[in-house]
Image (tube, rainbow, N blue to C red):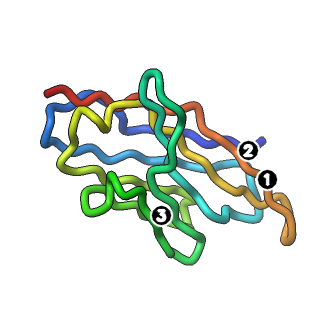
């Protein structure tokens, strides 16, 4: 059974830093692209950053230069380093991943989310 489990959320003051982790388990074939999304209260879920299995990355404009996405393929784990946090970064952060079901097929999964709260 495939699971994505996020950790590392919490409450920080503006200007602070946090690092989120997402571990994918339950697949013998590995994980393709992985992404972080976030959803602020009353807003739609938005893409924060994405990383392919080869390490190519892209970021939302609002976080570029402040957040760093990375992964450890041996551990099927993705990370999001967040610095210079502002109250606008507050929300539930979700892990999303294309988990390989075979050598030729993947399915997309979501984690349950981890709360990040930034106070001014």
- Left of 119 or right of it: where is 10? right
**Which sits earlier in the primary sequence, circle 2 or circle 3?**
2
In the picture of the structure, the residue carrying the numbered disc 2 is: 2
Residue 20: horizontal and vertical position, in percent? 38, 45
Please report contact status of discs 1 and 3: CB closer than 8 Å, yes or no. no
Name the image quarter holding the C terminus: top left
Instruction: Please report the residue visible at 31 percent of the width from the left and 56 percent of the height from the top.
Output: 67
Q: What's the CA distance linking mark 1 and mark 3?
A: 19 Å
Give the quadrant of residue 13: top left
Say which mark, if any, is on residue 107. Answer: 1
Say which mark, if any, is on residue 6. Answer: none
> In this view of the protein, which residue sits in the foreground, 19 or 62?
62
Query: How would you rate the neighbour count of disc 1 (Cα within 10 Å): few for under 14, some for 14-19, many for 20 or more?
Result: few
Please report contact status of discs 2 and 1: CB closer than 8 Å, yes or no. yes
Instruction: Please report the residue visible at 40 percent of the width from the left and 28 percent of the height from the top.
Output: 115
- Left of 45 or right of it: where is 17? left
Name the image quarter holding the N terminus: top right
Residue 87: horizontal and vertical position, in percent? 24, 32
In the picture of the structure, the residue carrying the numbered disc 3 is: 71
SS at mark 1 in the image: strand
> In this view of the protein, which residue sits in the foreground, 3 or 60?
60
- Left of 58 or right of it: where is 52? right
SS at mark 2 in the image: loop
SS at mark 3 in the image: strand
Between circles 2 and 1, the one closer to the viewer is 1
Between circles 1 and 3, the one closer to the viewer is 1
- Residue 3's place in the image compared with 104, above or below, is above
- Residue 79's place in the image compared with 40, above or below, is below
Q: What's the CA distance linking mark 2 and mark 1?
A: 10 Å
Residue 114: horizontal and vertical position, in percent? 45, 32
């Amino acid at each position: 059974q495939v699971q994505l489990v996020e950790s590392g959320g919490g409450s920080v003051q503006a200007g602070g830093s946090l690092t989120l982790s997402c571990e994918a388990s339950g697949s013998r074939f590995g994980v393709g692209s992985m992404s972080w999304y976030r959803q602020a209260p009353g807003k739609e879920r938005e893409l924060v950053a994405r990383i392919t299995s080869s390490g190519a990355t892209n970021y939302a404009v609002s976080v570029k230069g402040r957040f760093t996405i990375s992964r450890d393929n041996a551990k099927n784990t993705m990370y999001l380093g967040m610095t210079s946090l502002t109250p606008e970064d507050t929300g539930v952060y979700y892990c999303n991943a294309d988990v390989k079901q075979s050598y030729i097929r993947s399915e997309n999964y979501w984690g349950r989310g981890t709360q990040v709260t930034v106070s001014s």
